[in-house]
Image: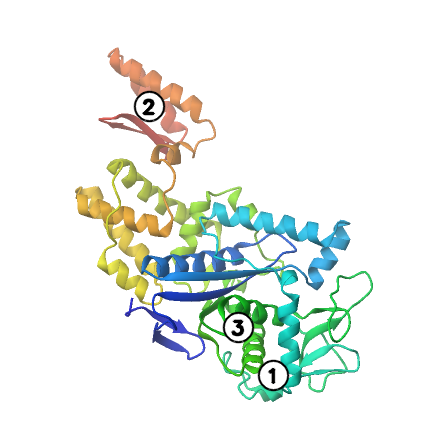
Amino acid sequence: MADLQLFNTLSRKKEVFEPLQAKKVGMYVCGVTVYDQCHVGHARVMIVFDTIFRWLQTSGYDVSYVRNFTDVDDKIIQRAKLAGIAIDELTQSMIDAFHQDMDALGCLRPTLEPRATTHMPEMIEMIQALIEKGFAYVCDSGDVLYAVRAFKDYGQLSGKNIDDLESGSRVDVDHHKRDPLDFVLWKQAKADEPSWDSPWGKGRPGWHIECSAMSCKHLGTTFDIHGGGMDLKFPHHENEIAQARAANDGGFAKYWLHNGFVNINAEKMSKSLGNFFTIKEVLERYDPEVLRMFILSTHYRSPLDYSDAALDEAKKGLDRLYETKRKLGEVEAGLLPQRFVDAMNDDFNTAEGMAILFEKCRSLNKSEDKKAAGEFYAMLNFFALLKHDADDWFQGDSEDGSNIDVLVQARDDAKKSRDYAQADAIRDQLLAQGIVLEDTPEGTRWKKA
């Protein structure tokens, strides 16, 4: 896999991927804050990095994939109070819902899924190191803050000039700060909120320290890949770098990967803007494979414009693939075509990979070839698509498949009895309902027009 190139946000260019250890990769991806159902923006992050995970494995790497859960946070506390339930009851229910969504979307489980609440010792240890090295201080309020200007490389990931920066959107306003850019590492406990013992009194961690501590705990102070959505580049990932490098005297992630936004009407999909669709809502109307196809059909770094029309197009594309699957029947997957391998090695270009898949689909519809069929199935398996039986896929389009099957059988019986007028009448009746019949050597098949 020496020819894999990926776009490193840190260097702002494509680089040849050279892991720290031969045939081993450590990858950390920022997970979700578990206070609510996940939306399509979250689906994109998870499907993108699931695909990267799969490609690294396909290429022969032993991958340690770590993706966290933030299970203590202001929003979690507020949502639990509003619902009148315990915080851990809320977070566990949201983690269960997250897993249900991800399993439906065909995402593999990561190697580890650490939770913030089980890593307090690691966070406290890192904060203590930052204080001792002059990168953090205890302010008059008792909170511990990171001294941003003490870290000379701050802004390197995002390309921002420190003198032009304002406090990040998730940093609490604190009049005791030495500098407006300084952010919270440890918050003093408040009444009726969860807290943990620390050298600075009872409290809980700030958001940014969680990922620095968990990634270093499970992957070491220097590891290969850190990823997440573009919205995390600043301030979250910038702050992660500042914390981890200062505490550990350098190191941290070698390559930084960020997927593009999901947009609705040219605006980023987000809960704060209220313009989001939950994964659960989308999957009530579309098969999970449709959403997976939609996301993988665009390069992961490009913006993705969400609409019903776009999902409908993805559904039509899947229909074409399922038509070919139905024609081919059971075929053993072969090797991935070299062009597909080259596309994936070019910064995980799933859009080009999809184009190659559909080229193969078109060629197989013209003439069957065992090698081409094997390549077709190999690409489908990699993308985790076409897991349904082909006949079930098309019949699932109908709300009343059993009634259609009865009419199809009646037409077949009419043809056997040479009552062609009746057979034609049934065909026309079904066509008026939007059902197209296909006569094949294996019998009559139907699908929605």
Mark pair 3, 1: CA separation? 14 Å
Disc assigned to residue 165: 1
For the C terminus, which image quadrant? top left
Q: Quadrant of residue 244?
A: bottom right
For image coordinates 34% across by 63% down, the residue present is: 349
**Label 1 sits on what residue type?**
Leu
What is the x, y in percent for residue 189?
78, 68
* Callout 2 secondary element: helix
Sequence-first tag of 1 and 2: 1
Which amino acid, by three-letter code, is at mark 2?
Answer: Arg
On the picture, is 221 further left or further right than 350?
Answer: right
Relative depth, front residue between 295 and 74: 74
Q: Are marks 3 and 2 in contact (CB under 8 Å)?
A: no
Task: For marks 1 and 2, give the one nearer the viewer.
Answer: 1
Image color mode: rainbow
Q: Dividing the picture into quarters, in which one does residue 164 lie? A: bottom right
Residue designated by label 3: 233
- Dot 2 surroundings within 10 Å: few (below 14), some, or many (20 or more)? some
Graded by Cα atoms within 10 Å as few (under 14), some (14 to 19) or many (20 or more), the crowding at tag 1 reads: few
User: Which one is closest to the eye, mark 3 or mark 1?
Assistant: 3
The residue located at (58%, 56%) in the rendering is 276
- Residue 388 rendering spot, x and y as whole percentages: 38, 38
> Would you say residue 395 is visible in this rendering?
yes
SS for callout 3: helix
Instruction: Give the Cα distance between marks 3 and 2.
Output: 57 Å
